[in-house]
Image (cartoon, rainbow, N blue to C red):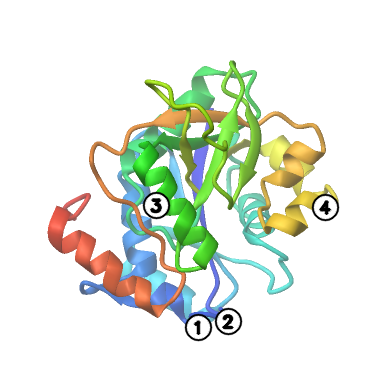
């Protein structure tokens, strides 16, 4: 069973043009994300999917990963990932969509997600989430409300399937218990190739458009999404959405060190 990590990477961004080539502590953003993907021993191939020659040239000159040119007409990262997968010499059975703005994604999380899909042939889609403390939950929720940062939250059923994803803090904590089911969702997805093809062909739903979360399209169409609980092992994760996030990531690297030494 062949598995590939595909990283969608766009040059044009309303908030941060040229983001994939931005330097973070001496290495480009796309270089950092690709290096984390390469550290995943459970995957067979790492691919950067882009629509921009500048990114293509940078990857070919500096990174030991494949780069695939995709259409500028791709509506989102999922479409770009699927298009890239179909252009590979060998079609992967499992496709891990790793966001190109996540330079602090622990590589063991990618390994765990890939192994989970290989070992559970009945699961069509899986995505990781990390259990967080109540204080972190409220802190992230407040950041989401003020628009300064935040994250995406997820709640799941007894079998680990997603019930809902939201930018708002969920669930509402009315009664305190010893262990609260509070999870922060990570923007990484693992698909069977056929399911990714099916998903890309689905029409967007109302909840997806309201929340601005692609994964809600799956739930609105009645498709199960398995949520895999993972452990950050004390590492802090941060995404690069705007220029200010570069400084935040550099600060985390300075305090916690590099995730991998390459």
Select label 2 or label 4 by which is in front.
4
Label 2 with label 1: CB-CB less than 8 Å: yes
Q: CA distance from mark 2 to mark 4?
A: 24 Å
Who comes first in sequence, dot 2 or dot 4?
Answer: 2
Residue in the picture at 83% in, 47% down = 202
Is 182 located above or below residue 252 in the figure? above
The residue that label 2 is drawn on is: 14
What x and y, as percent, mark residue 88?
59, 51
Local packing at callout 1 (Cα closer than 10 Å; few below 14, some 14-19, many 20+) is: some
Discs 1/4, front: 4
Left or right of 12? Residue 164 is right
Disc 3 to disc 2: CB gap under 8 Å:
no
Give left or right: position of 94 versus 131.
right
Distance between the alpha carbons at the discs numbered 4 and 3: 28 Å
Q: Residues within 10 Å of mark 2 (few under 14, many from 20)?
A: few
Gap between marks 1 and 3 measured at Cα: 29 Å
| Neighbours of disc 4 within 10 Å: few (<14), some (14-19), many (20+) | few
Give the distance between the C-alpha atoms of the residues marked 1 and 4, in whole angstroms.
29 Å
Is label 2 in a helix, a strand or a loop?
Answer: loop
Which quadrant would the C terminus be assigned to in this image? bottom left
Question: Viewer-nearest of labels 3 and 2?
Answer: 3
The residue pinned by badge 3 equals 139
Q: Please give the residue where the numbered disc 1 appears in the rendered image.
A: 17
Q: Considering the image in quadrants, where does the N terminus appear?
A: top right
Read off the residue under disc 4.
206
Residue ranking furthest to the right = 203
């Amino acid at each position: 069973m062949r598995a590939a990590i595909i990283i969608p990477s766009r040059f044009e961004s309303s908030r941060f043009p040229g983001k994939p080539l931005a330097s973070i502590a001496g290495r480009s953003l796309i270089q950092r994300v690709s290096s984390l993907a390469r550290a995943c021993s459970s995957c067979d191939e790492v691919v950067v999917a882009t629509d921009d020659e500048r990114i293509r040239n940078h990857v070919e000159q500096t990174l030991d990963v494949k780069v695939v040119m995709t259409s500028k007409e791709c509506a989102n990262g999922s479409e770009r990932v699927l298009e890239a997968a179909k252009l590979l010499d060998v079609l992967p059975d499992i496709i891990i969509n790793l966001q190109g703005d996540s330079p602090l994604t622990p590589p063991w999380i990618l390994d765990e997600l890939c192994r989970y899909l290989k070992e559970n042939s009945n699961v069509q889609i899986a995505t990781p989430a990390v259990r967080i403390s109540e204080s972190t939950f409220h802190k992230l929720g407040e950041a989401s409300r003020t628009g300064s940062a935040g994250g995406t939250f997820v709640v799941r059923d007894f079998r680990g399937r997603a019930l809902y994803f939201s930018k708002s803090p969920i669930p509402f904590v009315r009664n305190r218990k010893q262990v609260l089911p509070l999870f922060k969702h990570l923007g990484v997805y693992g698909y069977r190739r056929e399911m990714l093809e099916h998903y890309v062909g689905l029409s967007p739903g109302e909840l997806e458009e309201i929340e601005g979360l692609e994964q809600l399209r799956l739930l609105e169409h009645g498709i199960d999404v398995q949520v895999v609980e993972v452990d950050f092992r004390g590492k802090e994760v941060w995404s690069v959405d705007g220029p200010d996030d570069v400084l935040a990531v550099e600060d985390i690297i300075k305090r916690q060190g590099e995730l991998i030494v390459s």
